[in-house]
Image (spheres, helix red, strand yellow):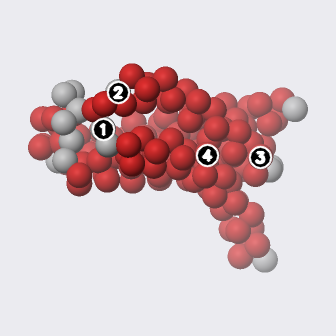
Amino acid sequence: MLRRIGAVVAGILAWTVVVTILNLGLRHGWPAYAAVEKAMTFSLAMMAARLAISALSSLASGYVAAWIGRDRWSALVAGVLIMLLFLPVHVQIWDRFPIWYHLTFLASLPLLSWLGGRLPRAATAAAR
């Protein structure tokens, strides 16, 4: 049980680290993005980039959680918890973004975490 709890916590931490690093790269590599980030007046391309960063972070989160927990459920739980953590934030900023953005972001968190959790097994099977 402690392994699974640790795996979920590690998955959430992995999501946070990866999303932070990728967002810093986006901020420093795309001056127009950095200029509008605080006001959250993103273009379509910027919203797509933010969703891509979240997607990669979710895959990494699921991979880490499943690798540590040795099961896919830890990955799914990590993704669901991340989604629940972001739900109140997205309710507060609901009118600042199109509905498709919120739904894509929130729905992708558990789904891509779960898919990321399948990666350790796929890598192990391919190595055999």
Q: Please tell me whether mark 3 or mark 4 is closer to you in this view.
A: 4
Tell me if residue 100 comes above or below residue 84 in the rendering.
below
Q: Residues within 10 Å of mark 3 (few under 14, many from 20)?
A: many
Which amino acid type corresponds to the residue marked 2 in the rendered image? Ile
Q: Nearer the viewer, residue 17 or 95?
A: 95
Helix, strand or loop for disc 3: helix
Which amino acid type corresponds to the residue marked 1 in the rendered image? Phe
Asked if the residue at tag 1 contacts the one at tag 2, i.e. Cβ–Cβ closer than 8 Å, the answer is: yes
**C-alpha distance separating marks 3 and 4:** 11 Å
Q: Earlier in the sequence, mark 4 or mark 1?
A: 1
Which amino acid type corresponds to the residue marked 4 in the rendered image? Pro
Which amino acid type corresponds to the residue marked 3 in the rendered image? Trp
Helix, strand or loop for disc 4: helix
For the point 19% across and 36% down, the residue is: 41
**C-alpha distance separating marks 2 and 1:** 7 Å
Residue 93: percent from the left, percent from the top?
A: 35, 27
Residue 27: percent from the left, percent from the top?
A: 23, 40
Q: Nearer the viewer, residue 32 or 107?
A: 107
Can you tell which mark lies on residue 93?
2
Tell me if residue 25 comes above or below residue 10 in the rendering.
below
Residue 4: percent from the left, percent from the top?
A: 80, 36
Q: Residues within 10 Å of mark 2 (few under 14, many from 20)?
A: few
Q: Earlier in the sequence, mark 4 or mark 2?
A: 2
Q: Which residue is disc 4 drawn over?
A: 110
Q: Please tell me whether mark 4 or mark 2 is closer to you in this view.
A: 2
Q: Please tell me whether mark 2 or mark 3 is closer to you in this view.
A: 2
Tell me if residue 125 comes above or below residue 31 in the rendering.
below
Q: Which residue is disc 1 drawn over?
A: 97
**C-alpha distance separating marks 3 and 1:** 31 Å
Residue 97: percent from the left, percent from the top?
A: 30, 38
- Residue 18 in sight from this viewpoint: yes
Q: Which residue is disc 3 drawn over?
A: 73
